[in-house]
Image (cartoon, rainbow, N blue to C red):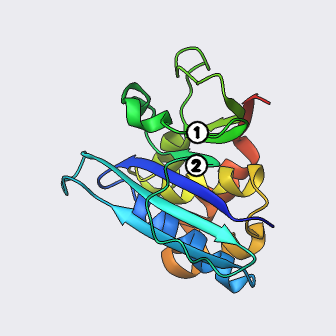
Amino acid sequence: MAMKEIRLHGRGGQGAVKAAQLVVRAAVTGGKQAQFIPFFGVERKGSPVFGYLRVADEPIRRKTQIYTPDMLLILDDSLVMLPETYAGLKEGGVIIINSTKSAEELNIPQQAGTVAEVDATAIAEKHLGRNIPNTTILGAFGKVSDLVDTETLFSTIEEIFGKENRKCAEEAYEAVTIIRK
């Protein structure tokens, strides 16, 4: 597998950093190479945050920001109004978004290939009692992407965050909808 570059967008307190760390751990457990480079900007709850995640079969030597991601994981659909959210998405790139809005409302760029959405907020609130959609969005990631073994991902989520978070991921895995392919 060629290296895949993923950019995560969320708001402070939604768990974007932890989500990326979980993917790295699951990838490494599965025998792949992975790295996460966080970028916080303003470090406050509710402020936009993003980070960079790479997964590959070979050693990863790059340590830079990701300017042309293969995939975007968007934990908060209000961030689609910011120009940097979709910036640089590769032709045919994958978008996985926490939303219930239509592709038109989400202003999905033309170059996007697969676009998947899941109401990660509702699932997280149902199981966790609050809007922390990180492990939930990873369930959708597990369904749409083949970058990590899904069972390894779910086991890693359970090991780090417990059974309720695993339930979030499993429910999102089943609930994710492809709105563009």
Extreme residue toward the top, this view: 104
- Label 1–label 2 contact, CB within 8 A: yes
Q: Quadrant of residue 152?
A: bottom right
Q: Which mark is residue 69?
A: 2
Image spot of residue 44 (x, y percent): 18, 54
Q: In percent of the image, x 47 and y 72: which residue is there?
A: 63
Image spot of residue 102 (x, y percent): 60, 18
Q: In percent of the image, x 58 and y 14: which residue is there?
A: 104
Q: Which mark is residue 89?
A: 1
Mark 1 vs mark 2, CA separation in Å: 5 Å
Q: Nearer the viewer, residue 93 or 107?
A: 93
Image spot of residue 42 (x, y percent): 18, 52
Which residue type carries mark 1? Answer: Leu
Q: Nearer the viewer, residue 65 or 102?
A: 65
Q: Quadrant of the C terminus?
A: top right
Pick whichever of labels 1 and 2 is earlier in the sequence: 2
Q: Quadrant of residue 39?
A: bottom left
For mark 1, give the secondary structure: loop
Image spot of residue 82 (x, y percent): 36, 30
For mark 2, give the secondary structure: loop
Q: Quadrant of the N terminus?
A: bottom right
